[in-house]
Amino acid sequence: MKIYLTICNKEKRYDKRLLEAVKRYSYPRINKIYAMAKKDEVEFRIFSGKFGLLKPKDKIPWYDQKLNIKYTSKLKKLVEGQLKKENIREIIFFIKRSTCWKPYISVIEKVSRNLKIKLEKRFI
């Protein structure tokens, strides 16, 4: 399976109830890539520093957790398990050149290399 992937964002809806990931992270970049995935008939995932790879309809609570280097080893294991379980073989990762994106990029690069998953980075 092939996926379009982008990271979550700090700004998110603060509703106390569970929300679908694509609604919790209602942000122009995420909405744009989600629309592209639907148009191209490709699965879409949001990369969360807390939950790993989220499907658009996965319901999540509000949280505030920035991904940092200390947490990347746990996150690598989580993401690796998710990729294996879903048999994801190709990732198109929509990224920006920004220091806050580096831990996410590092995790995806290492996991995809370990699992021999094709990774393409597209700058947005």
Image: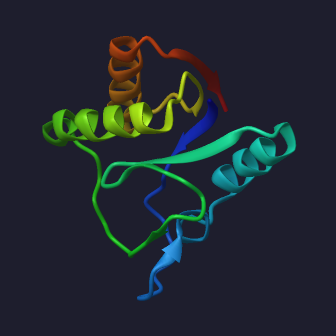
Quarter of the image containing the N terminus?
Answer: top right
Q: Nearer the viewer, residue 64 or 76?
A: 76
Please provide percent x and percent y for residue 12: 49, 69
Residue farthest right in this picture: 39
Task: Identify the image quadrant of residue 60.
Answer: bottom left
Q: How many numbered badges does the structure rendering display?
A: 0
Expressed as whole percent of the image width and height from the top left, the position of residue 2 reads 64, 29
Q: Residue 111 sits in which quadrant?
A: top left
Residue at the spot 24% in from the left edge and 35% down from the top edge: 77
In percent of the image, x 64 and y 52: which residue is there? 30
Question: At 38% across and 16% down in the image, what residue appears?
Answer: 115
In the picture, measured across the screen, residue 110 lies left or right of residue 14, that is: left
Q: Position of residue 86 (x, y in %)?
A: 49, 38
Q: Extreme bottom residue here?
A: 16
Q: Residue furthest left?
A: 70
- Measuring from the top left, give residue 87's x and y in whole percent: 50, 30
Q: Is residue 107 above or below residue 9?
A: above
Rendering colour mode: rainbow
Front-lying residue, 37 or 106? 37
The residue depicted at 13 percent of the width and 39 percent of the height is 70
* Picture layout, residue 49 above or below residue 102: below
Location of the C terminus (image quadrant): top right
Q: Is residue 93 above or below residue 12?
A: above
In this rendered view, identify the residue nearer to me: 55 or 93: 55
Report whether 33 appears left or right of 17.
right
